[in-house]
Amino acid sequence: MTSKSALTIFVTGVMCCAVSVVAVILTAKTFGPLPLSVSQTTTQKQGTFDVTGQSEVTVVPDNAELTLGLEVTKPKVAEAQIQVNQVISDLTTKLKTMGIDAKDIKTQNYSVNPNYDYTTGTQRTNGYRVSSSLRVNVKQFDQINGIIDTATAAGVTEIGNVQFTLSDEKEAEVKQQARKEAIDKAKNNASELSGLAGMKLGKIVNISELTPARPIMYESSKSAISLSAGGALDQATNIEAGSSSYTYTVTLSYETL
């Protein structure tokens, strides 16, 4: 190869490199910088060890509620109102005499409605129905049977929704006791289960509870208390409060080590 040929090859190579550099510069100017992709993977420990505890506390109610009422139909509104008002007034007086506080005697319903007759084929008013009822709260349960007997003797014809419940104070006390027992059981379960499984538990990171509905120990409808045609009970009243169970559930979440 002559020196002229070698020079020609060298010059050609230099020109090709220059063209490549110019091409890259033009590409960068036209499309912007070339993208740079960085892939990153992170690992984070997830999950907890969840365990449930349940308690059941037997409770005796400390509050009773009952509804006492009547309905009267008369040709004129005033006549029906006079009879209803007289019965309710007499009953309220007798309840207070028995030691029931005025704040525990509340009017639950008072209504006046026309009584329609369709026997002639058309609507015709043949009287008016007036109804009223009292909601009575009772703390001394030995008074309940006497209250019902007194009410029927006064002219009450409807007795219903007798409920034995917990007062707010009693419910708070029972709930605190049930919570403590449920949490203690959950902790014992966590210790036993993790030990058997060979797991190490850390601190408690979450707690959730299933709050039960307010317990009602006893409830009756109107039909459960039978009244004779004269408005008196067929037999002496005998209602007992009894007891009920308050069930509480809690779930503890532990971190695992």
Image (cartoon, grey):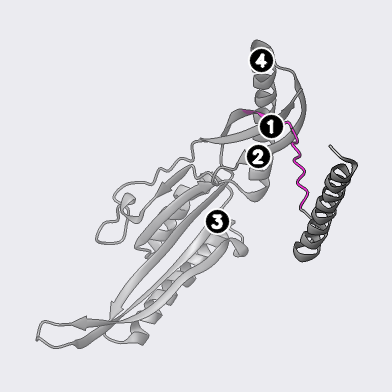
View extreme (left): residue = 120
- Percent x, y for residue 57? 59, 31
Q: CA distance from mark 3 to mark 4?
A: 47 Å
| Residue of label 4 | 192
Kind of residue sitting beneath label 4: Glu
Reading the chain from its start, which is encountered first: label 4 or label 1? 4
Q: CA distance from mark 2 to mark 1?
A: 9 Å
Residue 48 is marked as none
View extreme (front): residue = 2
Q: Which residues are magenta?
A: 35-51
Kind of residue sitting beneath label 3: Asn
The residue closer to the viewer here, 196 or 106, is: 196
Reading the chain from its start, which is encountered first: label 3 or label 4? 3
| Residue of label 1 | 253
Residue plotted at (63% across, 44% down): 171
Q: What secondary structure predominates along the stretch shown in magenta?
A: loop
Residue 94 vs 233, above or below: the answer is: below
Q: Where is the C terminus found, in terms of image quarters?
A: top right
Q: Are marks 2 and 1 in contact (CB under 8 Å)?
A: yes
Q: Are marks 1 and 3 in contact (CB under 8 Å)?
A: no
| Residue of label 2 | 208
Kind of residue sitting beneath label 2: Ser
Q: CA distance from mark 4 to mark 2?
A: 20 Å
Which of the 4 quarters of the picture holds residue 85?
bottom left
Q: Nearer the viewer, mark 2 or mark 1?
A: 1
- Residue 55 highlighted magenta (yes or no): no
